[in-house]
Amino acid sequence: MKILVATDGSKNSLRAVQYAARLGHLLRTGSNKITLISVHDDAGLRHAKSFVGKAEVADYLRELSEKELKPARKLLQADGIGYDIEIRTGHVAQEIVACADKGKFDMIVLGSKGRSAVADLLIGSVAQRVLATAKQPVVVVK
């Protein structure tokens, strides 16, 4: 089973990594694969690119993703679970779903920030957008 786990360094996303690890242990088919994905929306940084350059912004976002992925990587390494890393920029939910489709993942696991229903209704969340657009089963971990 191929599991794509979206992580942003938050406590909830780390719980999603823990859930995917436990799921991988339970299935133990030998062909389980976990891929950690970190996505940063660079739309707000387009103006900055004209001042500091595209390469510098890309480097900054990559470093930020590496920092956010570090706790998830440690957790999987401690459990002896192999994993891959995917780092992307763009609309977060769209990039998660696109990665899941392109990589032919069986499942997407992601954390929920636990915002109130009113806030989700007004601004939406990455989890809701992934749930609405993904073809694969999606597990949202609180």
Image (cartoon, grey):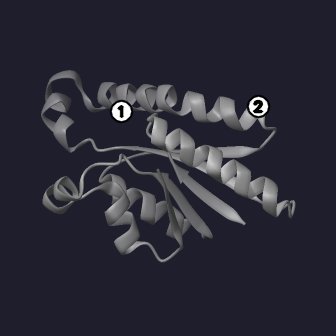
Q: Position of residue 13 (x, y in %)?
A: 49, 43
The amino acid type found where label 1 is placed reads Ala
Q: For the residue carrying disc 2, how many other residues have a C-alpha within 10 Å: few (<14), some (14-19), or many (20+)?
A: few
Q: Nearer the viewer, residue 61 or 132?
A: 132
Tag 2 residue: 78
Cβ atoms under marks 1 and 2 closer than 8 Å: no
Q: Is residue 94 above or below residue 17?
A: below
Q: Which mark is residue 9?
A: none
Q: Nearer the viewer, residue 25 or 77?
A: 25
User: CA gap, disc 1 to disc 2?
Assistant: 30 Å
Residue at point 72%, 51% (across, down): 22
Residue at point 17%, 39% (across, down): 44
Q: Nearer the viewer, residue 51 or 23?
A: 23
Q: For the residue carrying disc 1, how many other residues have a C-alpha within 10 Å: few (<14), some (14-19), or many (20+)?
A: some
Q: Position of residue 86 (x, y in %)?
A: 54, 46
Q: Which mark is residue 58?
A: 1
Q: Position of residue 117 (x, y in %)?
A: 23, 58
Is 76 positioned to the left or the right of 107 in the image? right
